[in-house]
Image (cartoon, helix red, strand yellow):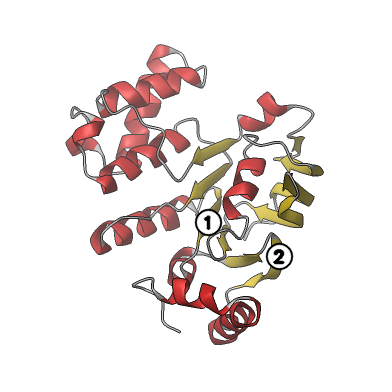
Amino acid sequence: MNSESLIEAVALSRFFGAHCAVEKINLQLGRGEVLGLLGPNGAGKSTTMQMLTGNLAPGSGEIKVNGIDLLDEPRKAKCHIGYLPEQPPVYRDMSVNEYLRYCARLHSLEWREAITAADEAKERCNLQEVQHRLIGNLSKGFQQRVGIAQAILHKPAVIILDEPTVGLDPIQIREIRALIRELGEEHGIILSTHILPEVQAVCDRVQILNRGRTVFNDKLGAVESLENIFFELVYQDDPAVVVSVAAEPEVSV
């Protein structure tokens, strides 16, 4: 991993009324690193990612993106972020070409630059064969690819992906994972998931959240010990959560 720091988040917290969704989380990301944000549903993953992208203000804490304070200079900091939320932000009545060029213009690219950026994103995400089709007529896997393409149009330093393979079939999952690994060679990537094999397949490091707190943060070295830490934690806190995690087709307990 390159030592260049792309994200530094310190003591992030967020309350919704009396409920603490995220409590004093620290998070770092370097260029060339793929970080997996892992945890059961309700662990605080999506809330954390929304704060990191500037879509949700933290109750307390600091976030720097490529050295820029996200709270003090949000527009400048967001220029370095590409974001794919859990539901891809696509317009179903647009063709892939129309949508990507439109998104490029939203990033203040001139028309010719927008066309070039859209073409490069289509090539990276293997969308050439569907570029003239309406997004609403594409499979969920291709719609995910379009969502990733819009996130990398402006060549951001940081790419943040929220549950990028949810609802995809096994072939689509393998294709998206391969794309994430390729993007991770040039960018810093954070992806959230509740499936451990997802992290094992593409990530260099994992940060496990449970009930809004970080309970594990290290490189993917000793996978066996990582599994023991994760599932032992879930058993102690709430055995029902283990059932829901184990129900995932790719997870064994």
- The picture places residue 203, in percent across and down from the top left corner, at 52, 64
**How far from the left and from the top, in percent, is residue 74?**
70, 28
Q: Which mark is residue 214?
A: 2
Q: Position of residue 217 (x, y in %)?
A: 68, 69
Q: Secondary structure at mark 2?
A: strand
Relative height, residue 108 to residue 120 (above, below): above
In terms of image quadrants, where is residue 223?
A: bottom right
Quarter of the image holding residue 70? top right
Dot 2: few (<14), some (14–19), or many (≥20) neighbours within 10 Å?
A: many
Q: Residue at the top extreme?
A: 111
Q: Amino acid at mark 2?
A: Thr
* Image quadrant occupied by the N terminus: bottom right
Q: Earlier in the sequence, mark 2 or mark 1?
A: 1
Tally of marks: 2
* Residue 2 drawn at (x, y percent): 64, 56
Q: Is residue 221 above or below residue 217?
A: below
Q: Residue at x 36, y 73 (%)?
A: 250
Q: Secondary structure at mark 1?
A: strand
Q: Is residue 198 above or below residue 100?
A: below
The residue carrying pointer 1 sits among few (fewer than 14), some (14 to 19) or many (20 or more) residues within 10 Å by Cα, namely: many
Tell me the kind of residue under disc 1: Ser
Question: Marks 2 and 1, Cα distance to the nearest angstrom?
Answer: 14 Å
Horizontal arrangement in the rendering, residue 11 relative to residue 40 (left or right):
right
Q: Which residue is located at x 40 percent, y 39 percent?
A: 88
Instruction: Choose top left, top right, bottom left or bottom right for residue 66.
Output: top right
Q: Which mark is residue 192?
A: 1
Q: Nearer the viewer, residue 43 or 104?
A: 43
In this rendering, position of residue 238 left or right of residue 253: right
Picture residue at 60% right of the left edge, 77% below the top: 234
Q: Residue at x 63, y 55 (%)?
A: 44
